[in-house]
Image (cartoon, grey):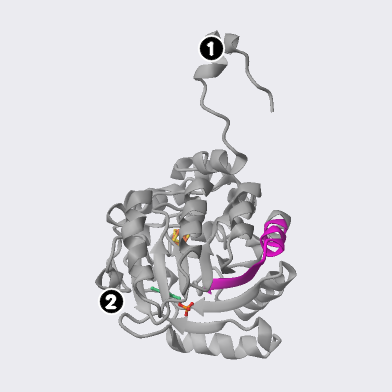
Amino acid sequence: MITRTPIAVHCEEVVSPPAVTSWQRQLGDVIRDPAELCRRLDLEPTALLGANTGHALFPVRVPEAYLKRIRRGDPDDPLLRQVLPVAAEAEPTPGFVDDPLAESAHTPKAGLIHKYAGRVLLIASPTCAINCRYCFRRHFPYADNAPSLREWDDTLDYLRADASIHEAILSGGDPLASPDRRLASLVERLGAIAHLKRLRIHTRLPVVIPDRVDEELLAWLRATRLQKVIVLHINHAQEIDDDVIAACRRLQAAGATLLNQSVLLRGVNDDVGTLSALSERLFEAGVLPYYLHVLDPVTGAAHFDISDDDARTLVAELRKTLPGFLMPRLVREIPDEASKTPL
Ligand SMILES: *Cc1c(COP(=O)(O)O)cnc(C)c1O
Ligand code: SF4
């Protein structure tokens, strides 16, 4: 590292922002404009009409590293469909609501959701690197649920006081959108709670910006005494490029068990070949399939929905193509149930 001499005080460099690491720059440089997204992917101008409608409801957000994996000029690309808004998002659909999981009823402290025995979910970051159109938290009141470091103490009191809690799950938004300084401090405080055994992190960041898995992240991950489980969110094999595989290897080398959850999405991964290829590709990355969720009925996402019967048929067919350990569990989240519900 070069130490600057005092003369630098008079140089322009001093007023420029401090150097940011590559993932932070990538997080700042995401595509936020539907017109730019369409232009960069050589899409017909007609795609933009619907995109603007959906964008007004839930803004476009696509990292460059993810854009790279989308085929140009193909409006049906399975990765594009996860990020490009469509006009149908504005159509109200019976049964589709803003808070489909009724999570606000299970929030005893800001940023904490306690629904299941032994596990609590902490909203460790209000933001995401990518905005997925099917997201069940697209209407989540993050502004009210993003504790500052000091407020975490109050939230963590809840964990300290309940010895039945063995697992802290970092969620969001995307927990890894937070700076490592913040995460390291939070994880250190979690590690100090004697009855906690596991740290689980639900994240899409290593997938959408693989450079997120840098030395700073790995340092706090390695340092904790807690057992580490990282649940990635990958819906299609095309999302797993060599950079994602390398990021997974780094996480594993730091002692994390890697699992994946997907959402069953019409037009993205609702066929046996696609789901089978996803499981195979996940295993190449050292990741085991965990859950295949049916869509949560959130306003604006009804066009991704698949009936329960179709989902069951699909999974029965999938079982004929894969070894048992590559089969995800087909589940639904039902408000007020004590666990995810198998279909
Ligand atoms: C899904 C979920 C969990 C974790 O459930 P597992 O079945 O252990 O993966 C915990 N808390 C909440 C609120 C959840 O939605
Ligand atoms: S990364 Fe997860 S929480 Fe964030 S928008 Fe996508 S689905 Fe929602």
In-image side of 255 versus 263 (left or right) = right
Crowding at dot 2, Cα within 10 Å, few <14 / some 14-19 / many 20+, comes out as few
Residue type beneath disc 1: Val
Q: Where, by quadrant of the figure, is residue 1 drawn?
A: top right
**Can residue 60 be seen in the rendering of this structure?**
yes
Name the residue at 49% across, 86% down: 310
For residue 9, the mark is 1
Tag 2 residue? 95
Identify which residue, 17 or 208, lies in the foreground: 17
Tag 1–tag 2 contact (CB < 8 Å): no
> Is residue 219 magenta-colored?
no
Find residue 268 and report its horizontal and vertical position in percent: 54, 68
In-image side of 102 versus 172 (left or right) = left
Front of the two marks 1 and 2: 1
Q: Which residues are magenta?
A: 246-262
Mark 1 and mark 2 lie on one chain; the one further toward the N terminus is 1
Identify which residue, 148 or 291, lies in the foreground: 148
Find residue 239 and report its horizontal and vertical position in percent: 63, 61
Crowding at dot 1, Cα within 10 Å, few <14 / some 14-19 / many 20+, comes out as few
Name the residue at 30% across, 64% down: 91
Find residue 50 and report its horizontal and vertical position in percent: 39, 53
Q: Where, by quadrant of the figure, is residue 305 drawn?
A: bottom left
In this picture, is 322 found above or below 230?
A: below
Identify which residue, 263 or 88, lies in the foreground: 263
Quadrant for ligand 1 reads bottom left
In this picture, is 160 found above or below 125?
A: below
Which secondary structure, mark 1?
Answer: helix
Residue type beneath disc 2: Gly
